[in-house]
Amino acid sequence: MSYEDLFREFSKRIEEYRALGVNPFSLATGCAVKVDLLTVLYPAIRSIKGELERLGMSIAPRRDADIFQGSIDGFTVSREIYRNEDDVDQERLRKLSPERAIVLAQVYQRIADNPDSLAKVVKAIYSRVAQASPGIVIGKGHSIVTADPKAQFMIFDYIKVRDSNKDRLVVGNNDTIQIIDPAEDPGSMRQTAVALGNSLNDLYTLGAWRNTIVIPVIDSPSKDLRRRIEDNVNRYAEALGARVVRAPQPDAGSLLMGATVFAETDRKPPFFYDEVSPGMEILVTRPIGELASINVYMMCMLDREIAEELKRQYGIGVDRLLEIKEGIIDKMARPNIEVAKAIEKRLPHLEEEFDPERHIAVTTDVTGPGIYVIKELAELSRASIRIDRIPLLSPELSEFATKNYIIPNATSGTNGATVIIAGKRVIDDIEAELRERGEEPIRIGRVISKGEARVLAPSTIRKYISAKAYLKEFELYEA
Amino acid sequence: MHGMEIDLEKISDGVYRLDARGYMCPYPQIFTLKAIDKIEDGSILEVLIDNPLSCENVPAVARKNGHEVLSIEKIGEGEYRISIRKRGGRVG
């Protein structure tokens, strides 16, 4: 296909979005839409945590998912949607008396600009919730930004446990995206599949996949598009053997897709941070950096000079770029359930002790922060980690995206790989199994010492990350 | 902005304004480059943005292309004005 053909198609698609009342340039692709963790979200949460705790609310430690004792049939979920603190019906909340909540906050981007303005908005709603349900635990919070001031809201999925089954755990998570590829129909199965896969990935990364429940989060500018996304959710869930549970939706008229999801497990989650020890190896289940190709493609369509530059510097023409992007989106649209099964097998049963010869110590999934998740694991494990290589789906596109400030962290992804830390024998074993199941596992480094959280990374990382806040978290060595 | 046209306005002689508020990263960067392409060498482009990431990336992409970033001002809650002087054409 020539540039002109692709541009014509792209322009037509942009007009389709506009006809729906959506400006595709006001949507972020995938997990690039998250509130900046390092400079905004974490400082905001730190600043309000103490006050909320005094009100009896606790915010669970930073983890991929909420975890509580019980079974998939032993709890109820009630969804409430708040635009401001006045929407919090404290009477109803007292009657409900939930023990936990999973929260999605979609915040107007001008408020997500700094920790103080974000903290103010979040604190007002959280305080009202805490007053009405003292003792509540916010098990998982997910924050994203929107360019539409009318689309600011918080979704609370309140959890009431009826039966705390002692031989099982429930793992819950919420994740949403606005769009994955603005050059594709927003109601396509692939867009929904990436969004749901991304929600489930936080469960899968903990080895939880059995008896999955999907509670969709869908916002759409049109009824027809919403119905199409709902149909996609049903088909996707059916193929996975998951149950869909209906719940209220924000109805803000913006574009949003994803879900709150739950699954059951009889294994201990891979949070054995104290067991991380020197010599343990680090494996990613497939190459990372999904978002670079989509963003580069968008830029090339918006500006022919960029497309020509890509061809000149890397020999990648638009037809090849399209091919790479499509292949990557296909990968993102595939649920990582094989990874979940492989992880589950290598976790201790609830009554069992961790055994470094048989069990995985720690996992996390690679999403918005990209390779930075290794630093988060280093902090949680108080370990020094050496990264030997950064395995990217397209090193050329990630490099081009960084060089041209198209994406501040070209290692970031959506429904991406899982990082696994374990002893050599376990890594050998899981690598072989994943390869057999058609995955592309790669060993990227190892734990070198305990006591201090450090990540040594090859200086080539500069080719893939331009955001200073992330770069300064690594100690670079000349590769 | 309509279609893929950029919202470029001439304010006075040698001074232009690009309103990229309401856009997500990376679009403000590309619209900035396209706006610079359209103005005369030596003139000033004021870019209005409200996307936190673009605050770092718009100046970076302007400098990378050889232009001069004169100032970055906060003009409201989460809103910024970035003033750029055009210096020559694009750099590959």
Image: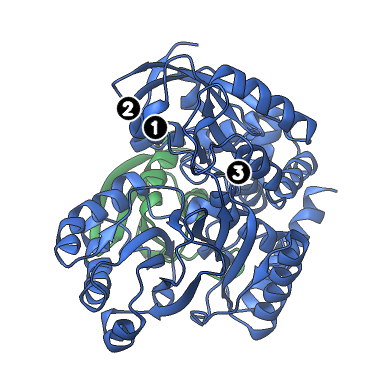
Chain colours: A blue, B green
Q: What distance separates the C-alpha of mark 2 from that of mark 1? A: 8 Å
Question: Quadrant of residue A240 in the image?
Answer: bottom right
Q: Disc 2 or disc 1, which is closer to the eye?
A: 1
Q: Are marks 2 and 1 on the same chain?
A: yes
Which mark, residue A273?
A: 1
Which secondary structure, mark 2?
Answer: loop
Q: From the top left corner, tell me how far across and down residue A245 is, in percent.
A: 61, 75
Disc 2 and disc 1 in contact, CB within 8 angstroms = yes
The tag on residue A382 is 2
| Chain assignment, label 3 | A
> Dividing the picture into quarters, in which one does residue A210 lie?
bottom right
User: In the image, which disc is placed on residue A7?
Assistant: none
Q: Amino acid at mark 1?
A: Tyr
Residue at 39% from the left image edge and 55% from the top image edge: A35
Amino acid residing under circle 2: Arg
Identified at 42% across, 15% down, the residue is A278
Crowding near pointer 2: few (<14 within 10 Å), some, many (20+)?
Answer: many
Mark sitting earlier along the chain (3/1): 1
What residue is shown at x 36% (from left), y 74% (from top)? A98
Amino acid identity at mark 3 = Gly
Q: Chain of mark 2?
A: A
